Image (tube, rainbow, N blue to C red):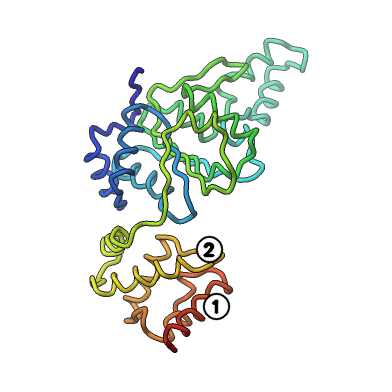
Amino acid sequence: MAVRSTGVEIGSVEQAADALRRGGYLADAATATVTYLASRLGKPLLLEGPAGTGKTELALALAQSTGARLVRLQCYEGLDETKVLYEWNYRKQLLGLQAKGGGEGSGSALDDVFSEPFLLSRPVLDAIRSTDPVVLLIDEIDRIEMETEALLLEVLSDFQVTIPELGRIGATARPFTVLTSNATRELSEALKRRCLYQWMDYPTPARERAIVLSRVPGISEELAEQIVQTVQAIRSLELKKPPSIAETLDWAATLVDLGLTPSDRDVLARTGGTLLKHRIDQATVQQELDTGTDG
């Protein structure tokens, strides 16, 4: 199998871990390995797992540390080809036709307006055409319909886009492509075959403690340990939305700023909005805390 590296060059697993660390992302061994392999093999990297487990942050950290340009496609229901790949600048085309005095039946005028100057590149085509290193982030791909997912298959196979009026446009250097999914629906096998895959779960206590210590200025090891133990226990409850890593960091920064600890009785009432974003979740956790205190 031919090796088809990306424009974002990573020479080893250790270099991958270091690059992510310089971008503020503490990767475990499996994540560092699959990041290196995605660069080495030139294959997209599909990161799947619960919301808030650091999937998007990996792409952001990699772009920041390597100096690559970040191109982001935020997926949503109803996203179509004109927002993913390209569309024609119809207003400019109309003005072009009027300037040439050509009507709809004028073949030469129509050929002219379906040319490069009238093309609007959307994120995926923009990344493919770039001559500089690019990290292409296709975020929350599970939110789009199967039909739109199918549009990406040619891109993820050969990193090229076929435009009927212009032909094939291929990448000079493959973008380092990261796809994220919160697993709200099953992705097609065709899509998965084109990618390397990594399941991203909530971090272990040791790794989350290391993240807190590295990202929250002025926090003590003791407080970081207390926060992580509390958050890990909260995630084990039946919640509408368990706290993400980012919310752990927000809560930690809040407790440092206010001089509070997770064991303070009114801590959730005062700071729960930084950690839990649903009223029912706050009530569930408060009840658990009260029960533990009473016991």
**Where residue 247 sits in the image (x, y, percent)?**
43, 65
Q: Residue at x 68, y 14 (%)?
A: 109
* Residue carrying label 2: 241
Q: Which residue is drawn at 60% across and 36% down?
A: 83
Number of residue marks: 2
Vertical position of residue 123 compared to residue 244: above or below = above
Sequence-first disc among 2 and 1: 2
Give the SS element for disc 2: loop
Q: Residues within 10 Å of mark 2 (few under 14, many from 20)?
A: some
Q: Residues within 10 Å of mark 1 (few under 14, many from 20)?
A: some
- In the image shown, does 101 or 249 lie closer to the viewer? 249
Image quarter (top left, top right, bottom left or bottom right) of the C terminus: bottom left
Residue 37 numbered tag: none
Tell me where residue 79 sits by quadrant: top right
Name of the residue lying farthest toward the bottom: 294
Label 2 to label 1: alpha-carbon separation: 13 Å
Image position of 112 (left or right of 239): right
Residue 283 numbered tag: 1
Vertical position of residue 59 compared to residue 37: above or below = below
Tag 2 near tag 1, CB within 8 Å: no
Tell me where residue 38 sits by quadrant: top left
Q: Which residue is drawn at 39% across and 44% down?
A: 59
Q: Which residue is drawn at 37% across and 24% down?
A: 173
Tell me where residue 14 sits by quadrant: top left
